[in-house]
Amino acid sequence: MSMGWDELAAAARAVLRPRRISEFVEVGGVAAAILTERGNVYVGICIDSACSLGMCAERNAAARMLTEGESVLSRLVCLDWDGRFLPPCGTCREFLMELDPKNAELEFMLSGERVVKLKDLLPDWWGEKYQDSGKSTEKS
């Protein structure tokens, strides 16, 4: 892992631009940056919409990562409009855990320079009993 927390936070800050793009949609009030197992960085911003079909910054960045063929994350930072570190919401925690068993070791930077692993944010995760080291779970 060659990228430090400061560099990863800088990548998120680079896209952190809160703005209203229509009467119904605001974007960029939260930004995230993902460092993958392969050493690539993907960024995303939150999309807040009146119809509730928005997307968190973490899942936006993860969608970019998935588009490029990756699914294993090493580190993730999420920043609010004031540049403070945020923990991922429950939906994002669940989504990231479901992508790959290795993501249990994913590290998040939280306020106060505290680092927490995804598995610590999802103790006794329900899906653990179904995981088989990344093998397909399709039924024959």
Image (cartoon, grey):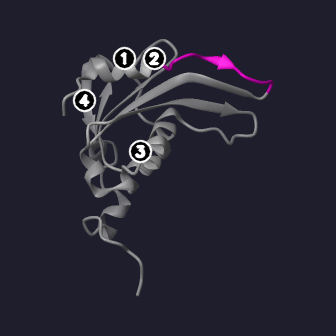
The three-letter code of the residue at mark 3 reads Arg
| 18 is within the stretch colored magenta | yes
The three-letter code of the residue at mark 1 reads Ala
Binning the other alpha carbons within 10 Å of mark 1 as few (below 14), some (14 to 19) or many (20 upward) gives some
Q: Quadrant of residue 111?
A: top left
The three-letter code of the residue at mark 4 reads Val
Give the residue number, with chain letter if any, for mark 2.
Answer: 14
The secondary structure making up most of the magenta span is loop
Q: Please report contact status of discs 1 and 4: CB closer than 8 Å, yes or no.
A: no
In the rendered structure, the answer to whether residue 87 lies left or right of residue 91 reads left
Report the residue at 25% width, 24% height from top: 114
Q: Please report contact status of discs 4 and 3: CB closer than 8 Å, yes or no.
A: no
Of circles 4 and 2, which is in front?
2
In the rendered structure, the answer to whether residue 82 lies left or right of residue 37 reads right
Residue 21 position in % (x across, y down): 72, 22
Q: Secondary structure at mark 1?
A: helix
Of circles 1 and 4, which is in front?
1
**Quadrant of the image containing the C terminus:** bottom left
Cα separation, mark 3 vs mark 2, equals 23 Å
Q: Nearer the viewer, residue 100 or 11?
A: 11
Q: Residue furthest front?
A: 68
Residues drawn in magenta: 14-23
How many numbered discs?
4
Q: Residue furthest left?
A: 1
Binning the other alpha carbons within 10 Å of mark 3 as few (below 14), some (14 to 19) or many (20 upward) gives some
In the rendered image of this protein, does residue 111 appear above or below residue 133?
A: above
Report the residue at 40% width, 51% height from top: 69
